[in-house]
Image: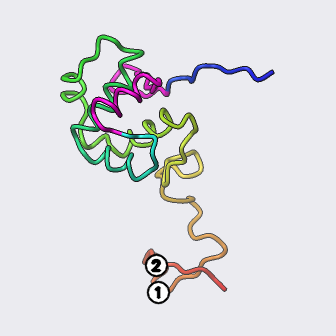
Amino acid sequence: MLQVQAGSPVQFAMGDKTYSLRFTLRALKTLEQEHKISVMRGGDNMIAAVRDPERLALILFYGLRGSHPEITLDWVEDNFDSGMLLDLAPVIAQAISGKPVEVPNESTPEKPNGIGLLSGPSGDTISDSPKTNSGISTLKN
């Protein structure tokens, strides 16, 4: 028998506090019916919604509200800013889809700066420039 379990919220830290973001069906329905924000109708709708500050604030508000009923829309608008967008986009996407999102150029132990390996160019690249540190590489045939 298939056992269904409610989705786990996606947690993120802001300052010294951890917040939980989760989109219940009620939150998704409210976003779509009352605010005409359809985050589940493909990536283009989600990207359009995140580009609009008013829509982004509403998405964050409804996603946070279930775990943090004290949070208001005004609080969201006062405490989140555009500088957080690159960090928040995968968090929002994971909270909506329920699936982890791979973040390009994310820092990991192997890539501490998020750009690449510390060892330099990989074995399948060659430099197009006489200067080996020019940053221009092409794939070998």
The circle on residue 129 is 1
Quarter holding the N terminus? top right
Residue 23 percent coordinates (x, y): 45, 27
Q: Is residue 87 magenta?
A: no
Tell me the amino acid under the disc marked 2. Answer: Ile
Position of the C terminus, as image quadrant, is bottom right
> In the rendered image, which residue does mark 2 sit on?
136
Q: Is residue 25 magenta?
A: yes
On the image, the x and y values in percent for residue 72 come to 24, 18
Extreme residue toward the top, this view: 70
In the image, residue 83 lies at what x, y percent?
27, 43
Q: Is residue 141 above or below residue 48?
A: below
Residue 66 appears at what percent x and percent y?
Answer: 40, 16
| Range of residues picked out in magenta | 10-37
Q: Residue at x 36, y 14 (%)?
A: 68
Binning the other alpha carbons within 10 Å of mark 1 as few (below 14), some (14 to 19) or many (20 upward) gives few
Circle 2 packing at 10 Å, graded few (<14), some (14-19), many (20+), is few
Residue at image position (23%, 23%) is: 73
**Drawn side of residue 114 relative to residue 15, left or right:** right
Q: Is residue 47 above or below residue 69?
A: below
The image quarter in which residue 19 lies? top left
Residue in front for this viewpoint, 31 or 22 = 31
